[in-house]
Image (cartoon, rainbow, N blue to C red):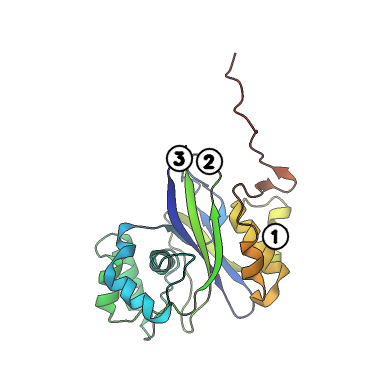
């Protein structure tokens, strides 16, 4: 059985209800070509005491998750979209330069925050719940989902690499594209989008998202095509 890695995903939303999702590069070994929310696994750096202390000022500790997941959400959101929630305004060209330095591993995320002279603001992150990849998956993640409205004056932009593209779309539009068979969507992402479409304005989404914290959630790769694990291991090939 694969080792479970901690991870985060961020549902970035505009005031008009549109969400920002990304398409993973087809070259990736896990979920290549699938649409998902910005996010990734928790790194050792996400436990940096300076980052945790900064985050704690605007996002109080929660018994359902530790603050490493929030610092990871901030870092991954910046890496993948260029959005950096902070109290101070930062010129777009400085954000782009800092993002490039982070992606090229010339600076750490905590170093970026110090060099920009900003105070991270995690107060806007709303916790939605978690999903754990089923036991039969070759790679497993325990991912916490957060909802965040796009900070004023910032724009989300994908730079090709691990991600192929990103776009703003309504939850209904995303579901319709998937139903027409035009795209592949990671099952946890699809589940979250269905709830966003069902509860416009996000009212009630936290409660209903967390109701499905099941050991093996529904896995619908195509409309009407479900992946169901067998109750027992299959017999070996003849």
Query: Element at badge 1?
Result: helix
The residue shown at (73%, 54%) is: 179
According to the image, label 1 marks what residue?
175
Q: In the figure, 123 relative to 38: above or below?
A: below
Label 3 vs label 1, nearer the camera: 3
Asked if residue 185 shows in the view, the reply is no
Q: Label 2's element?
A: loop
- Please rate how many residues cluster around mark 2, counting C-alpha atoms within 10 Å: few if below 14, some from 14 to 19, many from 20: few
Q: Is residue 17 left or right of residue 94?
A: right
Q: Secondary structure at mark 3?
A: loop
Q: How far is disc 3 from disc 1 in space, using C-alphas?
A: 30 Å
For the point 37% across and 75% down, which residue is it? Answer: 55
The alpha-carbon separation of the residues under discs 3 and 2 comes to 8 Å
Q: Residue furthest top?
A: 238
The reply to whether residue 48 is visible in this rendering is yes
Which of the 4 image quarters holds residue 233? top right
Q: What x and y, as percent, mark residue 87?
A: 39, 85
The residue beneath circle 3 is 2
- Percent coordinates x, y for residue 68 in the rendering: 38, 64
Q: Position of residue 124 (x, y in %)?
A: 49, 79
Q: Are marks 3 and 2 in contact (CB under 8 Å)?
A: yes
Disc ID at residue 70: none
Residue visible at 63% across and 50% down? 217
Crowding around mark 1 (Cα neighbors within 10 Å: few <14, some 14 to 19, many 20+) is: some
Residue 115 at what x, y percent from top left? 25, 76
Quadrant location of the C terminus in the rendered image:
top right
Residue 137: image tag: 2
Q: Earlier in the sequence, mark 2 or mark 1?
A: 2
């Amino acid at each position: 059985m694969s080792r479970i890695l901690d991870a985060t995903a961020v549902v970035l939303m505009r005031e008009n209800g549109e969400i920002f999702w990304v398409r993973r590069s087809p070259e990736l070994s896990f979920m290549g070509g699938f649409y998902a929310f910005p996010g990734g696994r928790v790194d050792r750096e996400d436990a940096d005491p300076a980052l945790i202390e900064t985050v704690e000022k605007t996002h109080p500790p929660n018994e359902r998750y530790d603050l490493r997941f929030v610092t990871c959400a901030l870092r991954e959101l910046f890496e993948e979209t260029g959005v950096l929630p902070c109290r101070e305004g930062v010129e777009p060209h400085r954000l782009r330069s800092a993002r490039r330095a982070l992606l090229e591993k010339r600076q750490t995320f905590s170093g970026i925050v110090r060099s920009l002279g900003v105070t991270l603001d995690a107060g806007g992150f709303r916790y939605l719940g978690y999903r754990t990849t089923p036991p039969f998956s070759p790679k497993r993640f325990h991912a916490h989902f957060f909802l965040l409205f796009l900070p004023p004056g910032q724009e989300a932009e994908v730079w090709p690499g691990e991600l192929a593209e990103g776009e703003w779309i309504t939850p209904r539009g995303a579901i319709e594209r998937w139903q027409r068979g035009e795209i592949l969507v990671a099952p946890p992402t699809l589940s979250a989008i269905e709830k966003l479409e069902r509860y416009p304005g996000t009212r009630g989404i936290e409660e209903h998202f967390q109701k499905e914290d099941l050991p093996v959630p529904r896995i619908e790769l195509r409309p009407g095509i479900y992946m169901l694990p067998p109750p027992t291991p299959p017999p070996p090939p003849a």
